[in-house]
Image (tube, rainbow, N blue to C red):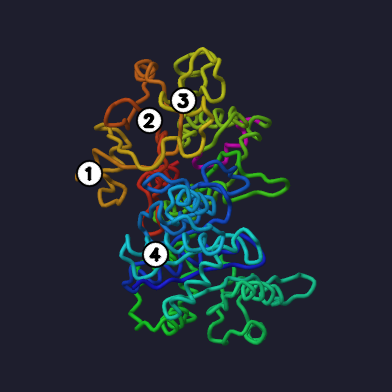
Amino acid sequence: MAKFIFVSGGVISGLGKGITTASLSLLLKSMGFKVSPVKADPYLNVDAGTMNPIIHGETFVTEDGLETDQDLGHYERFLNENLSKHNYMTAGQVFSSVIQKERRLDYDGICVETIPHVPQEILRRLEFTAEKDKVDFVILEIGGTVGEYQNMMFLEAARELKLRKPKDVLNIHVAYLPLPPSLGELKSKPVQTSVQLLQSAGIQPDIIIGRAQKPLDQVRKEKISVFCNVAMEDIFSNPDVDLIYEVPLILEKQGIMRRIFKKLGIKEKNLSLKEWKKVVNKAKTVKKKVKIGLVGKYFRSGEFSLEDSYICVMEAVKHGAWWNNVKPEIIWIDSLDIEKKGTKILKEFDGLIVPQGWGTRGIEGKISAAQFARENKVPYLGLCFGMQLAMVELARNVCHLKNAHSQEADPNSPHLVIHLMPDQEEYLKNRQYGGTIRLGAWPCKLLKGTQLRKIYEKHVSSPHTLYSKPHVFINERHRHRYEFNLKYKDLFEEKGIVFSGISPDKKLIEAMEIPSHPFFIGTQFHPELKSRFLSPHPIFLEFIKACLKK
């Protein structure tokens, strides 16, 4: 029988519930347990695919093609495992399932109500995941904060399961302690308030994890213990750190697994984190730096900048840098700034990455970045949209196709070198946007002798492969509805551009490169989605290596 751990949060979103869940998953796995982390988002969207990255953060795509919350990326990076659509649910999915069942008379004609039927559907999904994956633990991260009406159904599910299986369920509450500069001490009242809200939902936390700028002291723990009805030994500290991969080590050092096992009546096992500690130490101690420019357009939210918009790319860069024994200095460059100030602002970088994106805003800045990298021999990595815009730049300035463009940006261009995939036309015509693009893992054949194939050949032990010959076929994740127009393939090849990756049916271009350039690679797929802390993606490893040579 699987054990269930529910992770809730209080006061503010973005508190670190995802990293806490990922950390607990890693610790359990390192003790020999099989664990399946699940993210529950309280919004009515069916998935995360149609959300603005500035509002919601980067969309993560699973191997089986579901567009999910970015926390699944954290889970995969910590566990070094592929997760699936069963590791993610939204209130929209849950309500939709309940309504469909009612239409099919699955409820035998009774009055279908929010309670008990919605929480029951949530629990059905969790128990299905436990059975399907044959796991020892299911950890459900409840999105949002306690006290919001949107996530009450998930809290109710946690309450009901605890009532049914008191020895198999644990509730962990992640709560915030601010440090007002004018007062100079951590304040515990927000924790007390969020725990009261949790208790009003019928849940008494078994363990409290205090998120704060600094570690919790004895005074704060005593206050939390008294006012939140939690023993001192069940209160743990999770202070701000520069490296998120330190969090499992910080929690374990305080003995959190010992408390979890005692409460669930499980015999504690030996913990093996030798390799994890080794890489953490390397990441913290490397001195040499490499400066990477990330040219995007989803950074700004009013007067603030948002790291979450490209978090998978940033983590993949870090992985590649640490394994090359350097510290990455990642600088965000708004593509609109390039349009206003010119490419002179790109001169200081060792390498440039143009990541994913949609629409026309800032598009010329990204094209200019690709041209600058090509002409100045700066290592360039174009990811999805970044590859497409590199192709537009090459069409204009190397192939001399005047006003060449992507159909997405300028459908009236005389040379649509990037065009809509044929099967997408009907979807757009009918305004079917959600879940209709090319999603999930697809096979790609690598051309013999190319730089990209050599990169994969060099890292044959990589987990990012599909067949027994990893240097021939790879299996990478996609999220797009536009592709390179094969009508222009011969012209590009005449100009020295090599299409190093192609779909097995030869209908889709998956990767390109410029052999005369130290490192100029574009991929239609998203290698950043498969980069992990203990298993950096080969492309990012070699990109960083090229940046160091520069």
2 vs 1, front mark:
1
- Name the residue carrying label 2: 512
Residue 405: x and y in percent read: 52, 20
Q: Residue at x 56, y 20 (%)?
A: 410
Residue 280: x and y in percent read: 44, 65
| Whether label 4 touches label 3, CB < 8 Å | no
- Name the residue carrying label 3: 426
User: Against 25, is 469 above or below?
Assistant: above
Magenta includes 346? yes
Residue 118: x and y in percent read: 52, 59
Q: Which of pointers 4 and 3 lies earlier in the amino acid sequence?
A: 4
- Name the residue carrying label 4: 127
Query: Gap between marks 3 and 2, in whole Å?
Result: 28 Å
**In front of the other: 312 or 51:** 51
User: Against 305, is 212 above or below?
Assistant: below
Q: Secondary structure at mark 2?
A: strand
Residues shaded magenta: 342-355
